[in-house]
Amino acid sequence: MLYFYHMSSFEDQSADDDRVFKALASPVRRRVLDALKESTQTTGALCTLFPELDRTTVLQHLRVLEEAGLVTGRRSGRERHLSLAPLPIKRIHDRWISEYARAAVQLLAELDEA
């Protein structure tokens, strides 16, 4: 029984990771995340950062980012303030990158000692 719970948890995590990778696949969405990394932005402010796109297209990109858990929003009156949610990116880093980064740091430490 524990095995099935573990597999289900793994499958849930895999589905979450799939949404994050899909969201990160778009250069526009990466630019949105870059803007949100700098500071919280309103939806309107984000739309002005992408004059080549209409508002509907920007909102579609934001929906993909929100579904992946990469962006969170809160309403304040008529405005919606969006910010970066870094935990999904950290999960990807921990799963796919940290092991290689640890090995690289170890190699640099060994070179420094030599």
Image (tube, helix red, strand yellow):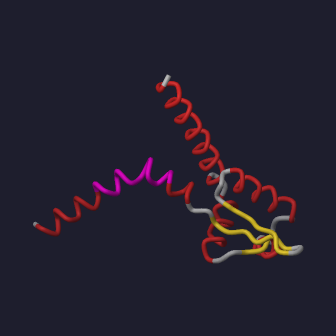
- The location of residue 109, given as percent across then percent down, is 20, 65
Q: Is residue 55 above or below residue 12?
A: below
Image quarter in which the C terminus is found: bottom left
Q: Nearer the viewer, residue 87 or 104?
A: 87
Residue 102 forms part of the magenta stretch: yes
Q: Nearer the viewer, residue 11 or 63?
A: 11
Residue lying farthest to the right in this orientation: 78
Q: Residue at x 81, y 69 (%)?
A: 75
Q: Quadrant of residue 58?
A: bottom right
Q: Is residue 106 above or below residue 34?
A: above
Taking 30 as reference, is 52 left or right? right
Q: Quadrant of residue 81?
A: bottom right
Q: What count of labels does the image hold?
A: 0
- The location of residue 59, given as percent across then percent down, is 82, 60
Q: Quadrant of residue 53?
A: bottom right
Q: Is residue 100 above or below residue 54?
A: above
Residue lying farthest to the left in this orientation: 114
Residue lying farthest to the front in this orientation: 1
Taking 25 as reference, is 80 left or right? right
Main secondary structure type of the part rendered in magenta: helix
Q: Residue at x 50, y 57 (%)?
A: 90
Give the magenta-colored segment's residue range.
91-103
Q: Residue at x 71, y 56 (%)?
A: 66
Taking 72 as reference, is 113 left or right? left
- The location of residue 106, given as percent across then percent down, is 23, 59
- The location of residue 113, given as percent across then percent down, is 12, 68
